[in-house]
Amino acid sequence: MRLAAAACLLLICLLVFPRITSAETAFPMLMSIKPVAATVGQSSEHMIVSRYTMYGAYEILVSGTGVSGEILPVDIKPEDAAKKPLEQLKVKFHVTADALPGVRDVRVVMPTGVSTVGQLVIGLGPVTSESSVNDSVDKATIVQVPATVCGVVEKAEDVDFYKFHAAAGQSLNFHVRCGRLQDKIHDLQLHCDPILMLRNSAGVTIASSDNYFRADPLLCHRFEQEGDYLLEIRDVRYQGNQYWEYAIEIGSQPLVECTFPLAVSRGSCEISAAGFLMPEKPLRLNIDEKTNRGEFWTTAKQGDQQTLPFAVEVTDLPLVREADADNSKPEQAQLLPVPCGLNGRLEAEGDVDCYTLEAKKGEAISLEIIARRRQSAIDSHLRILNDKGAQVQLSDDLKVGKRNFSDSWIENWVVPADGRYTIEIRDVHLRGGPRFPYFLQITRSQPYFELYLDTDKTQIPLGSHGVIYCRVERKNGFTGPVDLHIEGLPLGITATCGRIQAAKAVDGVIVLSAEHDAQLAVSAVRVTGTAVHEKDGEKLELTATGRPYQETYQPGGGRGHWPVDTHIVAVTEYGDIRGVTVSTEEIRLQPGGSQKVEVTIDRSPDFTANVTLDMLYRHLASSFGDSLPPGVTLDDKQAKTLLAGKDTKGFVTVKAAADAPPVENHVSVVMAHVSLNFVMKTTYCSPPIRISVEAKK
Ligand SMILES: [Ca+2]
Ligand SMILES: [Ca+2]
Ligand SMILES: [Ca+2]
Ligand SMILES: [Ca+2]
């Protein structure tokens, strides 16, 4: 009942206050790029479309190598810019001839901070944009193939038609990127579900595709007769949105969907591939010895044909291949060593693959399938059976950080008794075929941790402070504290790196401080965590790199997350709040004790919007980061956290529980939030506050 009431209240809030525009200086949120694709080896003009002004933008950031962005002159006088936000910015993207095709993260850098992430497709074919009247067959936009066709499903019932000529016997791939481009757009709650149809000149549908890569279509077609053909794209529900950009890559390059083997060692190897318009012979790969393990994007050449980029898994494990013999029953199972990396495939519908492990009681073993994450069609289902055929472990889907995948993972399985165990792998729907390779990593479980950053950008006004929240996920018996580190900061920025305390604490912060005379600057930073795991007198040094997550606005007002390539630190001009000061930067608490912290914000002239103070990073009922040490909380009754109008003074009270564990100089911070929309805030920060809790007397 209370939940229903809360949902009702939220709905009323959303209806009555659809958009909170209280900040006067906000960073822009990128909504779309028109056209959404650029071409390898060319320079082209595009329009970046945002919410909040991009007036004053001074740099474009593009992830990866080989693509750069140049801001074209803006013809608006400063006095006019104050009246009307510049929500369309002309840029020129330059793409080098050796740039890898695919999708790039794009950001706009402003004196007020760095934007959310936009998406740019790098294609091989020249870009053709939809004409404004291509809503009917007779007004179809003419395309010369190969091409990258760009358009928008801009309104309800929008249908876009394209006309092209194909020779007899010509085969073409039609690869749509649309729904997937919207995952990282912060403020785009409803995503497109495109459908693609191919028609002959008589208007008869000869092929269609709806969902191939998630909601996005992919078609490959051989044209038996020479002639004109029509391509039609729309949302499958006939919905539309001005930001639903799509790119359809049309060409005859081999399109590798997934490879077998799916995982490879460094050096030279041969692989076969499932995909479209593939050469008959195996592809040869050369993987540099310096390549990191994990997902690796590359292309391969076969004769004069170069494939489109595809991903393989680079591994350090000794590789084993599924044997040719039938292995569908436990008694036929192939014996696997521990550790190893197994490349297998569900060759046909109904295929079940069985392997055997010999294991001793008390050993800890981890089994992880990497398949769908590298574009295999499998939705894997993994079981461990004992020698009587009884199931002892099962995994269908896994979660990495904040995202779920169809791959399977049995982590830290403690072997219950000496014996032989069957590892059984199948597709959850018993599908199979060339598109169903998998890679099974079998390792002895080791303690480790993962580190996640919330959010993906930290804005630091001159002479003030910013904060990065880091959250740990501890694995396989590791329980210790994690020390945080940062590298790659812009000049003039200093970092106070905190610690994620031991045991159940999961959050820590890094507080960044900018000198008053620092230069406006921006850089991608690398955050790492280090720890020492001690067991039986042995010390194991652990380290992990933080993965940045960008916040997304979920339908209904929730705060979602999507992983992005970079965490950006930006030094900004003075914002709505020029500084946050606190009455003390050092707090010593007795167990059971408390302390009041007076907070003063320095409002910019004329800035009168609501400001809320907090030491936890939260939205609705969820906490996404807690800067306080274990056992220390905010006393909500002894606080003034809402500063309305011209109010500049508030306070918070921190209190230690009677059983709060002792801690020295835990780095914490007071934040002053200004809402941008229902989910997103601009966060201003105090200097680092060091909190200590004394040992119980
Ligand atoms: Ca359109
Ligand atoms: Ca679809
Ligand atoms: Ca098989
Ligand atoms: Ca699964």
Image: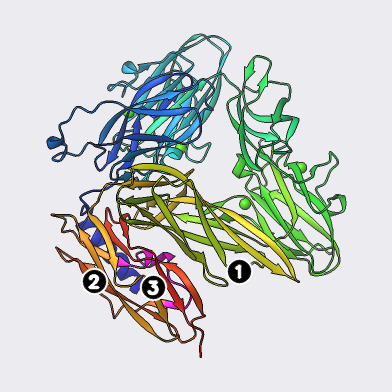
The circle drawn on residue 137 is none
State how many labels appear: 3
Q: Quadrant of ligand 1?
A: top left
Query: Left or right: where does residue 610 sit relative to residue 126?
Result: left
Looking at the rendering, the stretch of residues picked out in magenta corresponds to 613-632
CA gap between label 2 and label 1 equals: 36 Å
Which residue is painted at 26% across and 33% down in the image?
88
Q: Would residue 1 be visible to someone looking at this image?
A: no
Q: Amino acid at mark 1?
A: Gly
First-in-chain label (3 vs 1): 1
Nearer the observer: mark 3 or 1; the answer is 3
Coordinates of residue 214 in the picture (x, y in percent) = 51, 41
**Of helix, strand and loop, which one carries label 2?**
strand
| Residue 586: assigned label | 3
Q: Name the residue furthest front.
A: 517
Characterize the local packing of mark 1: few (<14), some (14-19) or many (20 or more) Cα atoms within 10 angstroms: some
